[in-house]
């Protein structure tokens, strides 16, 4: 191990640490957020949205990007876009106008049958758990 004039170590592990910190400081905020969400998916034991297949019962976790109430002629729906760093899935609650705690920026874990409707990935009436913070 050698030291530079500032006393910083040039050991390979130290360079990797510094490189990661510099990359995080200079990276796009969305890229950093996506990386943090992807690591949260792995640590929570959930499936990445990008790896989910139609018809599977999946558990996904991430951050809500948007929440929209969609009045329909037959059944009103509440739709929330969940982003996990690898992709997005729309969570759809049929017959609901509002659910306390379901708001943009909130982290949550959802479980349900993965489907495709009108060209987008959806989970209808998912079981969900809001994350603290």
Image (cartoon, helix red, strand yellow):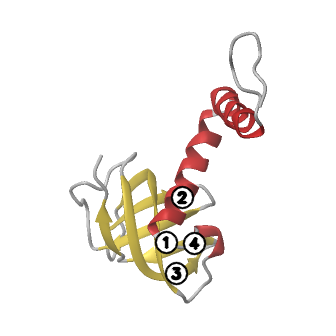
Q: Distance between the Cα atoms at labels 2 and 1?
A: 10 Å
Q: Distance between the Cα atoms at labels 4 and 2?
A: 13 Å
> Horizontally, is 82 left or right of 129 in the view?
right
Q: Quadrant of residue 86?
A: bottom right
Which numbered disc flags the more N-terminal residue, 2 or 1? 1
Q: Distance between the Cα atoms at labels 1 and 3?
A: 13 Å
Query: What residue is shown with label 1?
Result: 46
Q: Residues within 10 Å of mark 3 (few under 14, many from 20)?
A: many
Q: Residues within 10 Å of mark 4 (few under 14, many from 20)?
A: many
Q: Quadrant of the N terminus?
A: top right
Query: What residue is shown with label 2?
Result: 84
Q: Residues within 10 Å of mark 1 (few under 14, many from 20)?
A: some
Q: Is residue 4 above or below residue 2?
A: above
As drawn, the residue found furthest toward the top would be 5
Q: Residues within 10 Å of mark 2 (few under 14, many from 20)?
A: many
As drawn, the residue found furthest toward the left would be 100
Identify the element where label 2 is drawn: loop
Query: What residue is shown with label 4?
Result: 121
Q: Distance between the Cα atoms at labels 2 and 3?
A: 15 Å
Residue 3 position in % (x across, y down): 75, 20
Query: What residue is shown with label 3?
Result: 114
Dot 2 and dot 1 residues touching (CB under 8 Å): yes
Q: Distance between the Cα atoms at labels 4 and 1?
A: 17 Å
Instruction: Say which residue appears at 49% left-offset and 63% top-offset.
Output: 43
Dot 4 and dot 3 residues touching (CB under 8 Å): yes
Dot 2 and dot 3 residues touching (CB under 8 Å): no
Q: Nearer the viewer, mark 4 or mark 2?
A: 2
> Horizontally, is 33 left or right of 123 in the view?
right
Which numbered disc flags the more N-terminal residue, 4 or 1? 1
């Amino acid at each position: 191990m050698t030291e530079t004039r500032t006393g910083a170590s040039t050991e390979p592990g130290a360079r990797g640490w510094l490189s990661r910190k510099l990359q995080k400081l200079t990276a796009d905020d969305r890229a950093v957020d996506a990386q943090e969400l992807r690591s949260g998916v792995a640590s929570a034991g959930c499936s990445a949205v990008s790896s989910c297949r139609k018809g599977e019962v999946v558990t996904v976790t991430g951050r809500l990007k948007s929440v929209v109430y969609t009045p329909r002629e037959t059944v009103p729906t509440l739709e929330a876009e969940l982003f996990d760093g690898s992709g997005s899935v729309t969570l759809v609650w049929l017959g609901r106008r509002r659910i306390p705690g379901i708001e943009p920026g909130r982290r949550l874990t959802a479980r349900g049958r993965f489907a495709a409707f009108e060209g987008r990935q959806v989970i209808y009436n998912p079981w969900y758990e809001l994350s603290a913070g």
